[in-house]
Image (cartoon, helix red, strand yellow):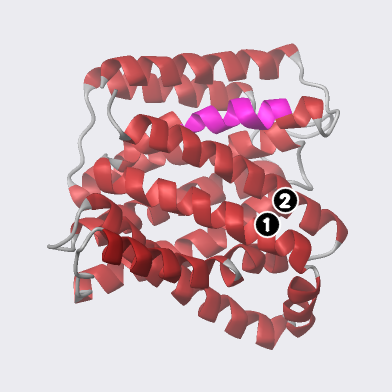
Amino acid sequence: MPVWIPVTIAAAFAQNLRFMLQRHLAATQLTPAGATFARFVFSAPLAILILLIYAAVSDQAIPRPTAEFLAFGAAGALSQIAATIAVVALFSARQFAVGIAFKKTETVQAAILGLLVLGDAVTPAAFVAILIGFGGVLALSKPQEGQVRFVNRATALGLLSGLLFAVSGVGYRGASLSLAEGDAVLRALLTLSAVTTFQTCIMAAGLAVTQRAEIAKTLRAWRITALVGLTSLIGSALWFIAFALQTVAYVKALGQVELVFSLLASTLIYKEKISPREAAGIALITASVLLLIWSV
């Protein structure tokens, strides 16, 4: 089995844990922007530390960032900030498992962007798997009672977050591929360190102007925000390694296994009911993941 497959599954599991923690923060203590800031402020210094340790243990020199690296990294970083704010805000519009499903439109969008920006093509079988997964997302997108399908706040937030997450994934892969030296793990860790540091500074500056109180709230809630940072660091490191090893479309498609994890959280932790339609959507996404693994 290719290394990127278990790495991606582990990344999806860690990301689901982080979204659960962010949902708690957004519901009880912080705004969506504050809950988003929490994922960066504690993970940035840890990412740098891990980079230095890995470089020393593996006896590799840290690659020198190029202009292309900085451009791809900045595009990915800014897109991820906006995407995370959108998906945290989405939790108040739909239940947890379905909220995560909306953002999974990023898979199809990532396939298109990856081809246009990086020239990353997908095989016919893999594209079929992506389309099956997208069908599962559509099955999960039935609006609440009284809402018009595809014309509601939840749909808009979900599609927007999916597009922005697709842009961020392509940006991170582009940044990693632009580095001429180092193995995939080192390049991924350098990209992660640079991106999270940049995101921390940008969000701190933005909050200082617009929501100054959120910075203090984030630090006061450190018992939870530190866990958000830790799960974010673990998940992001695994995502970045996967992006360095495989095209964004494949990684994003396999990453839809996160929906299975979110379904378990939705039913077992949040006691939310899953309709037959939503169960069918989960089944389609599971079939998509299995077909993708078989096709590559």
Which residue is located at x 67 percent, y 86 percent?
A: 208
Circle 1 residues within 10 Å: few <14, some 14–19, many ≥20: some
Magenta part of the protein: which range?
255-264
Q: Residue at x 74, y 75 (%)?
A: 219
User: Is 99 or 183 nearer to us in this picture?
Assistant: 183
Judge whether residue 257 is colored magenta.
yes
Q: For the residues carrying marks 2 and 1, which lies nearer the camera in this image? A: 1
Residue at left offset 80%, top offset 26%: 268
Seen in the picture, residue 263 relative to 235 is either above or below; the reply is above
From the viewer's perspective, is 116 left or right of 28?
left
Q: Estimate the x, y position of residue 276 in percent, counting from the top left.
A: 73, 12
Question: What residue is at 77 percent from the left and 36 percent from the top?
Answer: 95
Pinpoint residue 282: horizontal percent, then vertical percent.
60, 19
Quarter of the image that includes the C terminus: top left
Q: Secondary structure at mark 1?
A: helix
Residues at marks 2 and 1 touching, judged by CB atoms closer than 8 Å: yes
Give the quadrant of residue 205: bottom right
Residue 142 appears anywhere in the view: no
- 164 lies above or below 247: below
Q: Indicate the amino acid at tag 2.
A: Leu
Q: Main secondary structure of the magenta part?
A: helix
* Residue 253 highlighted magenta (yes or no): no
* Marking on residue 21: 2
Above-or-below relation of 117 to 294: below
Return the x and y of residue 86 as percentages of the image width and height.
63, 55
Report which quarter residue 176 is drawn in: bottom left
Check the image and name the residue furthest to the front.
Answer: 57
Q: Around disc 2, counting alpha carbons within 10 Å, would you say few (fewer than 14), some (14 to 19), or many (20 or more)?
A: many
Please provide percent x and percent y for residue 175: 27, 61
Q: Which residue is mark 1?
A: 227
In this rendering, the answer to whether 211 lies above or below 269 is: below
